[in-house]
Image (cartoon, rainbow, N blue to C red):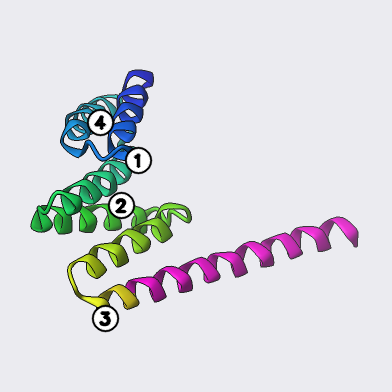
Amino acid sequence: MRVADVLNNIAGIYQSVELYKLALPYYKEAITIYRKEGAEEKAGFYWLNTAIIYAKIGQTKTAKKNFEKAYSLFKAKNDVYYLPEYFYHMAYFYKNSGNTQSASIMIEKGIKYSLKQAIMIESSLLNFLKLNWF
């Protein structure tokens, strides 16, 4: 899996310096290796990153499909880190498409999800503390 992680990191570097078309083959090779090694949980990251790239290069239909795939994987495993990240990028996608209403909805969903997770974490922490203090 280390080779796939390295390929994923190289893709991320290309993406961060806006060399999007150079990033895509590295992401694709990384996901191929992850799947062969049974690390399907990495697929959500792949779909999100490629959706971001496709949105940046104007391939909005492909971007939308990849965002949907990422969301279904993040939602299925209740990914507390990447679900808010997904909502952020969807808001950005809609904003850049001129759809400010959908962008606002995505922002609200991201905030609500993050607050819900914070409340759950706080509740768990309080229960833990109660068990250890009393």
Mark closest to the chain's N terminus, 3 or 4: 4
The residue carrying mark 4 is 35
Pointer 2: residues within 10 angstroms few (<14), some, or many (20+)?
A: many
Q: Are marks 2 and 4 in contact (CB under 8 Å)?
A: no
The residue carrying mark 2 is 73
The residue carrying mark 1 is 41
Q: Is residue 121 left or right of residue 93?
A: right
C-alpha distance separating marks 2 and 1: 8 Å
Say how many tags the image has. Answer: 4
Indicate the amino acid at tag 1.
Glu
C-alpha distance separating marks 3 and 1: 31 Å
In the image, 49 versus 19, the foreground residue is: 19
Indicate the amino acid at tag 2.
Leu
Between marks 3 and 1 in the image, the one whose residue lies nearer the viewer:
3
Mark closest to the chain's N terminus, 2 or 3: 2
In the image, 33 versus 99, the foreground residue is: 99
Mark closest to the chain's N terminus, 2 or 4: 4
The circle on residue 115 is: none
The residue carrying mark 3 is 101
Q: Is residue 81 left or right of residue 132?
A: left
Q: Are marks 2 and 1 in contact (CB under 8 Å)?
A: yes
Element carrying mark 2 = helix
Between marks 3 and 4 in the image, the one whose residue lies nearer the viewer:
3
Element carrying mark 3 = helix
C-alpha distance separating marks 2 and 3: 25 Å
Q: Which residues are magenta?
A: 106-134
Q: Are marks 4 and 1 in contact (CB under 8 Å)?
A: no
Residue 120 belongs to magenta span: yes
